[in-house]
Image (cartoon, grey):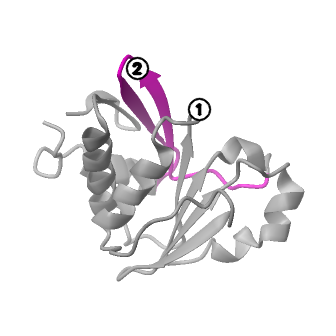
Amino acid sequence: MPMAQDPTSLQWHLPDPDATERLGAVLGGACPWDAPGPRLAYLSGQLGTGKTTLVAALLRGLGVREPVRSPSYALLELYPLIQGLAVHVDCYRLRGAQDIEVLGLRDYFADRHLVLIEWPEHAGEALPPPDLALQLTVLGAGRECRAVAHTRSGTQWLAQAAQPETSVLN
């Protein structure tokens, strides 16, 4: 169950990897597709906090059946969705804005695209503000995920994820 702060912020305690996967499924199902432009979600946290696990579950929540690979080496992985296209990016090895340009990431900031970026802080100022910023931290044996909405779509995304009928974290 999310711990509410305000309409633009939610926090979840994730005691185990299964809870992280359930949260990912909830976030995938809550993604708002009705507004123009891409949906942008940025995931931050130390190595091993569950960023890729959360992304994989989110994509499965959107119907992706193929294995979701960590984009650590390829930097970018694409997944077709019924709603459009998911773009999973890992910026860990990038050195700033110039690397984002070489990667061609700007081409994916389009309608009906969901862009999920791990390690966005490594991209410098090259990225637009996200709809959702997700911060994962280690908390004892589990994890904590804090989500902050930066746009109207992000606020809508969080509101849908917080609905009791969509939450599987009870």
Q: From what the image shows, is residue 23 above or below residue 80?
A: above
Residue 23 numbered mark, or none:
none
Residue drawn at 84 percent across, 60 percent down: 99
- Residue 20, position in %: x, y? 32, 42
Amino acid identity at mark 2? Leu
Left or right: 43, with 103 as reference point: left
Say which residue label 1 marks: 46
The answer to whether mark 1 and mark 2 are in CB contact below 8 A is: no
In this view, the residue in front, 145 or 164, is: 145
First in sequence, mark 1 or 2: give its number.
1
Q: Residue furthest right?
A: 98
- Residue 2, position in %: x, y? 25, 33
Quadrant of the image occupied by residue 145 = top left
Left or right: 70, with 168 as reference point: right
Residue drawn at 71 percent across, 41 percent down: 121
Q: In the picture, which quadrant includes the C terminus?
A: top left
Quadrant of the image occupied by residue 12 = top left
- Residue 79, position in %: x, y? 48, 76
Mark 2: give few (<14), some (14-19) or many (20+) Cα within 10 Å. Answer: few
Residue 88 belongs to magenta span: no
Residue at disc 2, secondary structure:
strand
Residue drawn at 47 percent across, 34 percent down: 136
Residue 130 belongs to magenta span: yes
In this view, the residue in front, 116 or 66, is: 66
Q: In the picture, which quadrant includes the N terminus?
A: top left
Residue 139 numbered mark, or none:
2
Q: From what the image shows, is residue 1 above or below residue 101?
A: above
Left or right: 161, with 47 as reference point: left
Amino acid identity at mark 1? Gln
Instruction: Tell me, yes or no, if residue 159 can be seen here.
Output: no
In this view, the residue in front, 117 or 155, is: 117
> From which residue to which does the magenta span run?
126-152
